[in-house]
Image (cartoon, rainbow, N blue to C red):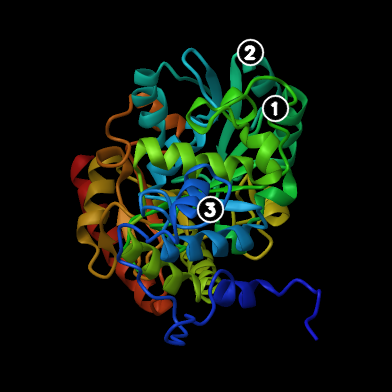
Amino acid sequence: MKSNKTPGFETRMIHAGTQPEPVTGARQTPIFQNTSYVFHDADHAASLFNLQTFGFIYSRLTNPTVAALEERLASLEGGRGATCCASGHAAQILAFFALMGPGDRFIASNRLYGGSITQFGKTFKKFDWHVDFVDVDEPEAVRRALTDRTKAIFVESLANPGGVVSDLEALAAIAQDAGIPLIVDNTMATPYLCRPFEWGADLVVHSTTKFLSGNGTSVGGAVVDSGRFDWSRSGKFPGLAEPEPAYHGLSFYETFGDMAFTMQAHAVGLRDLGATMAPMNAFQTLLGSETLSLRMERHCANAKAVAEFLEAHPQVDWVSCAALPSSPYHALAQKYLPLGAGSVFTFGVKGGYEAGVKVVEACELFSHLANIGDTRSLILHPASTTHRQLTDEQREAAGAGPEVVRLSVGLETLNDLVADLDQALTAASRVAAAAD
């Protein structure tokens, strides 16, 4: 007799969304490297195109391998449904595509990944979508930024690169009062460390490229819907609550209820934007997700130890890591990330820009590249790379000043990581001394 008890996180990260393949009995989900799917007959085809029957039509919309990953991510986040797509940036566009119209606005934290700041502040203007960047550490500043055209609040649960922890419960209360969704980028924390829906978030986005796959092989993104938001209440979201002309006047919210956003994201978002996840990338991400909890435990343990080493190092000015008691976000991390504060954080090198560049170039074990969440330890100088397109003021606000170095601490032997950083900092000290 089957139990009604919800399986634990580790069980779901291995089993959710997958089962033995019925034709061959293959236990691992196959890579359905396929474009389209045969209809039983004309009526079956019509019902699929009318969204009256669930099934597969064309892999731009749905694919069996991708669908397995979507079900797994929804389960891990505690959501109702998920939509996987080509990248984390594609996930952000997909999330806003369902909510925004020309002239609409949204509020976003000013402490975000540099690429998100550029996407929101520059590229979104081409759609006539507009962002108000706010210091979300100040709830009243968020409230003051609300307008009649504001359609969402967007934050990162754990900000990239500075290790800033968002007060999700407080922000969710503001969003609920305004009748708009709170969208949380949970990439850095993953659902193992942080569960935004449990604190009132409505949508969660991921770059699955990072910790969810964990192997540095596969670019992807996902939008997970809590299924709890009433899209019809305020009249602000016609794309979800009003008749959709392309589907004979169907209303997604009236027809699909708590699956409205997920159905719209597939039937309209993926159909028209075409930002589809490749089946191979979904397969690689499914494999990676099977070890998520184990990897995150080691990531967090290594990162905390490295942060403690750096905090005591004479060549380091400061360390921004929420795992440290010295962090102003330590209390929030204990509340929202009780299993660990992630493995990505920043520190400031004495000697400024040139010293920061030297640390990155002198590392031998840490790989110098623009990614996070790999099993390998990674290092970057944001001011010269990911945040290069921003103004000096934007870089400072985002925690990416000239002296800042970002680490994504991997799974290697801790002593080897410490030794590599120590020798790199020694090399940087010579640069700083020469500058003086």
Examine the image and state in which quarter residue 418 appears: bottom left
Could you say where residue 269 lies in the image, as x and y percent from the top left?
45, 38
Q: Residue furthest front?
A: 42
- Depth order, front residue of 423/47: 47
Kind of residue at badge 3? Cys
Q: Point out which mark residue 321 bears.
A: 3
Estimate how packed mark 2 is, as few (under 14), some (14 to 19) or many (20 or more) residues with alpha carbons within 10 Å: few
| Tag 3 secondary structure | loop
Could you say where residue 281 lies in the image, as x and y percent from the top left?
34, 63
x 63%, y 62%: residue = 75
Q: Point out which mark residue 89 bears.
A: none
Q: CA distance from mark 3 to mark 1?
A: 22 Å
Estimate how packed mark 1 is, as few (under 14), some (14 to 19) or many (20 or more) residues with alpha carbons within 10 Å: some
Kind of residue at badge 2? Thr
> Is residue 194 depicted above or below 292 in this figure?
above
Q: Label 2 belongs to which residue?
A: 147
> Is residue 199 depicted above or below 425 in this figure?
above
- Depth order, front residue of 25/276: 25
Residue 213 in sight: no
Q: Label 1 belongs to which residue?
A: 139
Residue 65 in sight: yes
Of the image marks 2 and 1, the number of the one nearer the N terminus: 1
Taking the image as shown, residue 164 lies to the left or right of residue 139, namely left
| Total number of numbered discs in the rendering | 3
Could you say where residue 36 lies in the image, as x and y percent from the top left?
33, 57
Kind of residue at badge 1? Pro
